[in-house]
Image (spheres, rainbow, N blue to C red):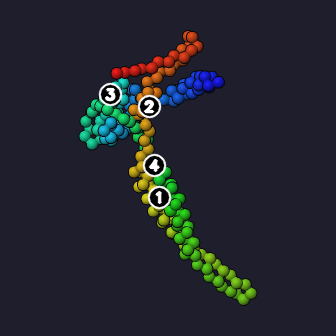
């Protein structure tokens, strides 16, 4: 029974794991972050990942550099920042605080014309707008400094990226190739 379960896991589990890994070779990344083996973070533009090297323009120096892939622990691609989300969240939180402040400024007046007593409740709405706008500004500042990074290459995942799985249409089979480099 153990052999059958292990065979099924290998047969069905391994291909899904391998198909989920995208190849990093030949990728051209507009803006990226390279984390080297000595824990340096390099921010670069036009990062090109080949079979054994990484080429990039340094963000500060504007010079083309090349690193060996065995010196790199991780390559990440920039997917933008959270400025829009931060603006919306800050605006909603600010408006909520503004509603609380506006309700605290509530005033009630009563007038009587003999048999009826009229009460009028007024609140100031300017705190809602002003604090909501301030919250949106703070949310934009916080969100624009929070970048979203997607990992393209990781030395830990290099084992899985060395597999090449293709469908062989002639024999209705699967072609499995593993590349091992020294």
First-in-chain label (1 vs 3): 3
Q: Which residue is mark 4?
A: 82
- Element under label 1? helix
Residue 25 picture quarter: top left
- Locate residue 82 relative to residue 11 in the image: left or right: left
Q: Which residue is mark 3?
A: 53
Which mark is nearer the camera, 4 or 1?
4
Quadrant showing the C terminus: top left
Q: Which residue is mark 1?
A: 136
On the image, the x and y values in percent for residue 21 come to 48, 29
First-in-chain label (2 vs 4): 4
Q: Which residue is mark 2?
A: 157
- Element under label 3? strand
On the image, the x and y values in percent for residue 42 come to 32, 40
Distance from disc 1 to disc 3, alpha carbons, whole Å, reads: 43 Å
Q: Residue furthest front?
A: 2
Q: Is residue 108 above or below residue 128?
A: below
Q: Are marks 1 and 3 in contact (CB under 8 Å)?
A: no
Residue 121 picture quarter: bottom right
């Amino acid at each position: 029974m153990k052999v059958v379960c292990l065979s099924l896991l290998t047969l069905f589990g391994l291909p899904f794991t391998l198909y989920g890994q995208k190849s990093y070779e030949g990728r051209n990344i507009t803006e990226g972050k390279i984390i080297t083996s000595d824990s340096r973070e390099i921010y670069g533009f036009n990062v090109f990942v080949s079979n054994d090297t990484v080429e990039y323009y340094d963000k500060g120096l504007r010079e083309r550099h090349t690193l060996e892939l065995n010196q790199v622990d991780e390559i990440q691609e920039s997917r933008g920042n959270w400025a829009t989300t931060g603006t919306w969240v800050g605006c909603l939180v600010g408006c909520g605080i503004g509603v609380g402040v506006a309700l605290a400024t509530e005033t009630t007046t009563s007038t009587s014309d003999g048999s009826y007593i009229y009460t009028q409740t007024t609140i100031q709405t300017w705190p809602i707008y002003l604090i909501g706008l301030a919250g949106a500004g703070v949310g934009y500042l916080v969100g624009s400094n929070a970048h979203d990074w997607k990992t393209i290459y990781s030395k830990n995942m290099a084992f899985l990226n060395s597999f090449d799985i293709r469908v062989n249409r002639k024999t209705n089979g699967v072609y499995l190739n593993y590349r091992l480099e020294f």
